[in-house]
Amino acid sequence: VVWLTENFRTHSGIIELAASIVRVLNDLFPATIESMAVERAKKKGQKPIFITKGDPLEALFARAHGSDPAQDQDTDSGDKGARTASSETPISFGADQVILVRDEEQKQQLEGRLGERARSLLILTVVECKGLEFEVVLVYDFFSSSQFSAQRWRVLFGYMASRGLLSEKQCHSSKYQHPQFDQQVHKLMASELKLLYVLTTRAKSVVLFYERDPEPT
C-alpha cells in the first residue's frame, strides 16, 4: 500500500489538528482505527479558532443589519469568510461556508431558534457533510451536545501530560485535573473523536468552533 501523505487542498493549521485527533485514536483506541501515514501540507495556515464569547451567528446577522458585533465577540474572526449583505437582502452563508452540527435533532433545534434567518444559512449534519469541502467551517455546539460528559473529556489532560504536552506547573494545577483513563469507561470518546475528525477536515481555509455552553471545552 502506498500512502498519499501530501495534502494540497488545505493548510498546516487544519492538517495538524486532524493529525492530533488521529494520534489520540491510535494511542488510546488502537483497535478502532486503521493505522495510516501522517498527512502533511505545504501551505501554512492559521490554527482552528475557538470563539469564547458571543454567538458568531448572532454577530453575523447583526453585522448584516448594520450593527457592530465587536462588543460581543472575543475574536474578530467569528465571521471570517462569511458574506454579508445590506439590511434589505438576506445574509449569505452558503456555497463556501457552512455550519456543521452533530445530528438532525441539533440541526432542527438550531433552525428553530434562528427562525426565518436559517433559510439564508447552510447547516449540515456530520452525515450530510461527509465528502464535501468548504472554505470556512463553523462547528457549532459539538462538545456541549455530546453524551460524553465534560468531566470525561478531561481525561485528555492526562494524555497530554504523559506526552510532555503540559508543563510541570500545569500538571499540578487544579485546572488540569483529570480522571484516570479507562478504555471501557471512555470508549465513547473514540466515536466522538471520529466525528470531530470528519467535521474539522471539511474545511480548506478556516475552522471555527463555538459552544454556547463553554464548560465542555
Image (spheres, rainbow, N blue to C red):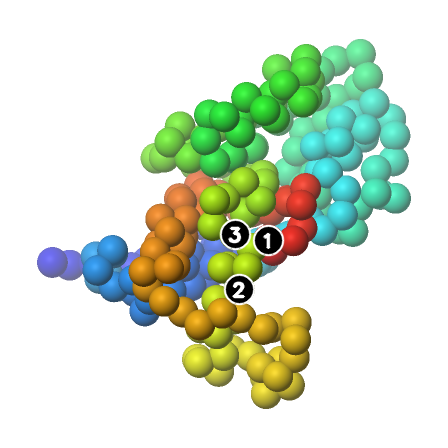
The kind of secondary structure element at disc 2 is loop
Please give the residue where the numbered disc 3 appears in the rendered image. 149
Picture quadrant of residue 20: bottom left
- x, y percentage for residue 76? 76, 48
Asked whether, in this view, residue 143 is left or right of residue 28, the answer is right
User: Nearer the N terminus, badge 3 or badge 1?
Assistant: 3
Label located before the other in sequence (2 or 3):
3
Q: Is residue 82 visible from the viewing direction of this image?
A: yes
**Residue type, label 2:** Arg
Image coordinates of residue 118 in percent, x first then y, are: 63, 19
Residue under the image location 62 percent in, 84 percent down = 172
Q: Along the line of sight, which residue is nearer the eye, 207 or 110?
A: 110
Q: CA distance from mark 3 to mark 1?
A: 7 Å
Residue 216 is tagged as 1
Give the total number of marks visible in the rendering.
3
Q: Indicate the quadrant where residue 88 lies.
A: top right
Q: Which mark is residue 154?
A: 2
Which picture quadrant has residue 2?
bottom left
Q: Residue at x 67, y 22 (%)?
A: 113
Asked if residue 103 is positioned above or below residue 142 in the image, the reply reads above
x then y, percent, for residue 81: 64, 38
Q: Amino acid at mark 1?
A: Pro
Can residue 41 be seen here? no
Say whether residue 181 is left or right of residue 90: left
Instruction: Determine contact: label 3, label 1, CB under 8 Å.
Output: yes
Which residue occupies 49% across, 69% down?
179
Q: Secondary structure at mark 1?
A: loop
Q: CA distance from mark 1 to mark 2?
A: 9 Å
